Amino acid sequence: MIYKILLLLILIIFTACGEDSKTSVLETVETKNSQVDQVDQNETNETNITIPKVSKTITIYVHGYSQSGYNKTGVYGDIDQDSVVDNLSEFTNLPTMYNYDENSTNILAVTPYYGDEAPSYYTQKDLEDIDTVTKTYGGGIPRYATIIAKFARHVMKTSDAEHINIVSASMGSLVTRWLIEKDIEQLASQKKISKWLSIEGVIRGNYAASNNILIGIVDPIVQQHIDTKHMDYDWINKNLEGASATHPNYKEIQMGFISSTHDKDGALDTFLALNGQLQPNDGVQLLKDTKFSSTPNHTPTYTHFYQDHLGIKKDKGAWAQVATFLASKKRVKITLESATISNLHEHINKYFNKKAEIVFQSRVKSPKVYEDFDIDEEISERIVAGGALNLIKYKNENESKSIGQIVFDDYVLDDETELNIKITGYELDKVMIYDVRELSFGSSKESLGTIELNIPLENNTIEVFGKDWSGMVKVEVLP
């Protein structure tokens, strides 16, 4: 049990294996852009008009937590190699800072923020900035954010890039949040950050690092250090603003969150259940802590996978969504708006089962991703066992209820015309994560039937029909 609890304090970085595919997502997009540029160039030659230089972007990967990283020696903030970036380069066919050329318009980069030796490009002011932030906060998140921001300025200058994208994982997302909200190196206020995609991020903090009972158990064995202290809810609430994208520095940034809901090891689920707080999580992060809530002026994308904190590294559907987020301009939102149940699969009575508890599970695939890249995995999964579905209570058969549950909310390939969705209704009897504990000797849930269809990606509301339920599905292609 101690071993399992120790795992809760080890935030695993997002490492991944890019599988070979027929071609790559960003390669296809860049090829199309190059064809457009070539047409423009031909027109320019005929009219003697000068075409503006193509904008260049650096996509920076911000890695996650290492248990001994805070104490690491060596150079920080310099151009580095990393298995995540190498695999992302293989998957997307994008160059890294080691192999790009002057025609590259999107380059991948990574740097270690752990270490005790400054890189050679640092000026005296850079050294003073690092020294000041380290003394002020004891190092940790503010120090790492300053290192990443200075690295961003360095690689932008080196490559002549005008903007950066950020892909962050686990604790790297808290580093990124600090960088943006504190406007380190004026990257946010000068509108240099185009996109930020957070994967399993420590956005609002970490439950294990904030729980005094867990800390008391593990502290004699693995003493807390600056990284875990900075992931505490109280520290974050004291030093950063709110839990939504209301900060003005987010206004111009395209934001997205990839989160998972499978505690494969079961340690965090067990502890939460013992404390009467069972809720969706990935074994390390609570789902609610991996993303911001929407605001009227800024709605990030939200994509779920049924993976644990480490398992998402093997999910090719997740890789497809990372690449699509970076390349595409086409955002789609699909919502199960309402549902009518014709067979409740519940014996309603006034003493025990007063209502039927219904949830709707969804899986989404991209026909275009499969056609172009041979990836058949789901690009969004909202699964019953994950505990993140809307629980709707029905009392009568043929009763209609508002559901309002997101089925898909992310970017798709620009030439995607439809998505394949499967929505399954379930009546729950004994599922702890939804706090449904009926007296039943049968299965924990009963299927109301699965609806599978290819939904055209155009603004519309579609009526769907299943075995024991029907519903209305709303499709929005967002500007």
Image: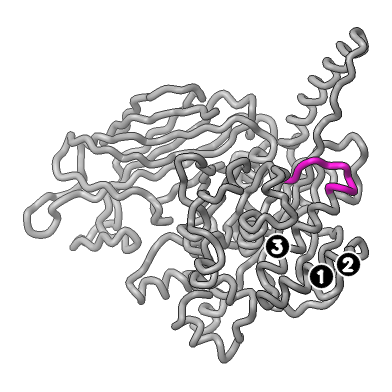
Query: As drawn, is 367 to the left or to the right of 38?
Result: left
Magenta stretch, residue numbers: 156-164
Residue 242 image offset from top left, x and y in percent: 48, 58
Query: As drawn, is 442 to the left or to the right of 278?
Result: left
Residue located beneath label 1 in the image: 128
Q: Are marks 3 and 2 in contact (CB under 8 Å)?
A: no
Q: Amino acid at mark 1?
A: Glu
Q: Residue at x 12, y 50 (%)?
A: 348
Residue located beneath label 3 in the image: 145
Q: CA distance from mark 2 to mark 1?
A: 6 Å
Q: Residue furthest left?
A: 350
In front: 223, or 234?
234
Res 196 seen here: yes
In front: 123, or 196?
123
Q: Amino acid at mark 3?
A: Ala
Residue 258 image offset from top left, x and y in percent: 56, 50
17 versus 468 height, above or below: below
Label 1: element kind = helix
Q: Could you say which quadrant of the image residue 353 lies in?
A: bottom left
Q: Could you say which quadrant of the image residue 270 lies in?
A: bottom left
Q: CA distance from mark 3 to mark 1?
A: 15 Å
Q: Amino acid at mark 2?
A: Gln
Residue located beneath label 2 in the image: 124
Q: Are marks 2 and 1 in contact (CB under 8 Å)?
A: yes
Query: As drawn, is 266 to the left or to the right of 13?
Result: left
Res 264 seen here: no
